[in-house]
């Protein structure tokens, strides 16, 4: 992808926390003696009620990893209480509403009080340590408050992105067996209303274990109400005490579940721990964003994704930072919105996704250059590879060639950033995520697990445990092993393709499995296929990625209709609606291609590899066709795809 660019950008700032030489020394130490390294960091970054007995034990061979066993702490205490004395009046959250006229600043003291109150509400309605609470909220302070309130009493939150459909919400509530849902009457994004409460009502028809629904009143519009089950957030918090002691949690007690797509089956409930996770997001937030006291930090990700969890809420708050939460979208009211917010709140560190950068670049420089952005110091990206045009634009136009860019590679499963530059310590190469973070041991291997030389593309694996890693797949230990440790026993399989260059920089090229990244959103091809075949007209569907200039990838669906069904534009629309209903707007195929037949192996497996090549018009590299059950299918598909 970007392998032609090898220009190393000299450092434009100094990382005052770590230098390049220190990075190298510390990195080597962190791998040689992880116990000492992580033990020291755990003392530095986290306030423990009781110290651990062992920093870590077990390993990837038996997949029996434990971090900080015996240690006691509370994530909400670390994000709130311990900051009160030194920075109680400093802003913890700056909230910027969808409407530019709406914003709010919440101090650490005030956030602490709000969290304690809501924690008492949770208790009042029967939520106990270990219970699961579903949070289906827009980007409003109550999302962070609800997360921290769960953490405070030891309940496990499962945040579901507000853009997910009724069906997707339902299956997530059921899988985690949630006892409560926290939602809003409506969400507001780009001046459009999102019927969150209505979706919850519909989902709960099939969720008998949910006893209560707490509803934040975000808009004035009324919603239907179940007197026995529904509770207004503002009424409930007014009725309870402001004091709520933080529960003493084990380092290995789960903090949250977050569902993410895999290459097969339904989304997986990724389970994260309290101690290891919090330490990992705190240290990475501090060092990778070079965070300094009193700086304003903004991560644009929704709390419904891991980036919102780790770098919108837990990482920054654990470090006593000011984190900005934005309810809206980059192009409302205009395409200047991001940069207007940067100026309005004097944002110093800005972290977003390549897809947003590309979309804004297309709108023209004028939207950016009319703003000052002088407060900006560091820029970050995450979610997918960043192409060189987008990188250059971000660097030159947004950052005025003053701000280093940290291209951060990581996953829902890794908890925090795994490969990234340390701004000012790592010379930058546009398009490369650069070097592994402390304690992270990546390797690029071929399909047989042979270590590949520099410059050779292969599968990216991680060979040593790190504190932020997932504990398991919720209630599915077998799937945990199969998805991450089966292909190469002893190593964690990332599912990404990458290579390492001669300077030790990692270049992440995309997924090596059937997972898509559409506008940075992770979607399993099989999920979309399962959605499409729900339609009575569909016999079979195969979904692949098509390169997209803005979204990175778009969903391209090959659909075989049942005998006697006639293809039509209306039917295409129905199928798109089926995907929307079953998953959400992010899963709607950009293209639906009718196909008489799909290329299959003789054992009946769809050869998506071939479909990808056909979609990308890479016909010279179709590869071995001898395993095809019916080779004429391929010729037929090439013909119809080329007609477009
Ligand atoms: C944080 C997040 C994970 C997948 C991962 C990659 C891709 C993420 C980068 C990237 C290239 C990056 N979690 N990915 N960051 N690819 N460069 N800097 O996105 O679970 O939703 O997705 O995202 O394929 O495996 S995620």
Image (tube, helix red, strand yellow):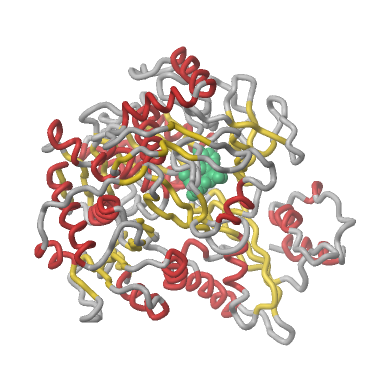
The quadrant the N terminus occupies is top right
Residue 374 spot, x, y in % from top left: 26, 29
Front-most of residues 522 and 45: 45
Depth check: 48 or 255 in front?
Answer: 48
Residue 639 coordinates in the image, percent (x, y): 78, 63
Q: Is residue 584 left or right of residue 375?
A: right
On-image quarter of the C terminus: bottom right
* Residue at x 49% of width, y 23% of height: 30
Q: Name the residue at the right extreme.
A: 626
Q: Is residue 117 above or below residue 61?
A: below
Location of residue 629 with respect to 54 vertically, above or below: below
Residue at the outermost bottom position: 564
Q: Is residue 520 above or below residue 508?
A: below
Q: Residue furthest top?
A: 21
Q: Is residue 354 visible?
A: no
Percent across and percent down for residue 605 are 77, 63
Q: Is residue 113 above or below residue 89?
A: below
Q: Residue placed at 53% from the left, 70% from the top?
A: 579
């Amino acid at each position: 992808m970007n392998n032609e660019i090898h220009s190393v950008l000299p450092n434009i700032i100094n990382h005052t926390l770590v230098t390049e030489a220190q990075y190298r020394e510390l990195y080597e130490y962190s791998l040689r003696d992880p116990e000492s390294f992580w033990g020291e960091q755990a003392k530095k970054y986290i306030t423990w009620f009781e110290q651990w007995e062992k920093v870590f034990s077990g390993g990837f061979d038996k997949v029996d990893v434990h971090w900080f066993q015996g240690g006691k702490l509370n994530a909400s205490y670390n994000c709130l209480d311990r900051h009160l004395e030194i920075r109680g009046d400093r802003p913890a959250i700056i909230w910027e509403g969808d409407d530019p006229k709406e914003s709010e600043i919440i101090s650490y003291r005030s956030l602490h009080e709000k969290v304690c109150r809501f924690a008492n509400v949770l208790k009042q309605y029967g939520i106990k340590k270990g219970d699961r609470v579903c949070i289906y909220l827009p980007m409003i302070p109550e999302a962070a408050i609800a997360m921290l309130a769960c953490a405070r009493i030891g309940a496990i939150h499962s945040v579901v992105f507000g853009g997910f459909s009724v069906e997707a919400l339902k299956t997530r509530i059921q899988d985690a067996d949630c006892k409560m849902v926290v939602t809003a009457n409506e969400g507001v994004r780009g001046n459009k209303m999102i019927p969150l409460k209505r979706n919850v009502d519909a989902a709960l028809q099939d969720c008998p274990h949910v006893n209560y629904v707490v509803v934040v009143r975000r808009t004035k519009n009324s919603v239907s109400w179940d007197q026995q089950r529904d509770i207004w957030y503002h009424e409930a918090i007014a009725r309870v005490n402001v004091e709520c002691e933080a529960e003493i949690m084990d380092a290995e007690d789960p903090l949250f579940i977050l569902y993410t797509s895999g290459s097969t089956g339904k989304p997986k409930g990724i389970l994260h721990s309290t101690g290891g996770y919090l330490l990992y997001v705190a240290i990475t937030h501090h060092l990778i964003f070079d965070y300094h006291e009193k700086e304003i930090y903004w991560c644009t990700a929704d709390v419904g994704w891991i980036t919102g969890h780790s770098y919108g809420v837990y990482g920054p708050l654990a470090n006593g930072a000011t984190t900005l939460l934005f309810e809206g979208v980059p192009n409302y009211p205009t395409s200047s919105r991001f940069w207007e917010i940067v100026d309005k709140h004097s944002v110093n560190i800005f972290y977003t996704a390549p897809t947003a950068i590309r979309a804004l670049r297309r709108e023209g420089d004028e939207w950016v250059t009319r703003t000052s952005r002088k407060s900006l110091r560091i820029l970050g990206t995450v979610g997918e590879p960043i192409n060189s045009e987008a990188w250059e634009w971000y660097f030159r136009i947004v950052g005025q060639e003053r701000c280093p860019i940290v291209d951060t590679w990581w996953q829902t499963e890794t908890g925090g950033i795994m490969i990234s530059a340390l701004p000012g310590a790592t010379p930058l190469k546009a398009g490369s995520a650069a070097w592994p973070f402390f304690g992270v041991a990546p390797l690029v291997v071929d399909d047989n697990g042979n270590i590949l030389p520099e410059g050779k593309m292969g599968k990216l694996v991680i060979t040593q445990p790190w504190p932020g890693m997932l504990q398991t797949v919720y209630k599915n230990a077998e799937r945990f092993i199969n998805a991450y440790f089966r292909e190469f026993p002893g190593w964690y399989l990332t599912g990404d393709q990458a290579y390492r260059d001669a300077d030790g920089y990692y270049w992440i090229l995309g997924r090596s499995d059937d997972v898509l990244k559409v506008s940075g959103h992770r979607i399993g091809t099989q999920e979309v296929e399962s959605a499409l075949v729900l339609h009575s007209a569909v016999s079979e569907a195969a979904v692949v990625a098509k390169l997209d200039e803005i979204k990175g990838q778009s969903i391209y669906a090959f659909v075989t209709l049942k005998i006697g069904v006639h293809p039509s534009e209306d039917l295409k629309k129905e199928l798109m609606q089926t995907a929307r209903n079953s998953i959400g707007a992010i899963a709607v195929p950009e293209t639906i291609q009718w196909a008489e037949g799909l290329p299959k192996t003789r054992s009946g497996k769809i050869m998506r590899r071939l479909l990808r090549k056909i979609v990308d018009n890479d016909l010279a590299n179709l590869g071995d066709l001898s395993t095809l059950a019916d080779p004429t299918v391929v010729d037929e598909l090439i013909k119809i795809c080329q007609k477009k």
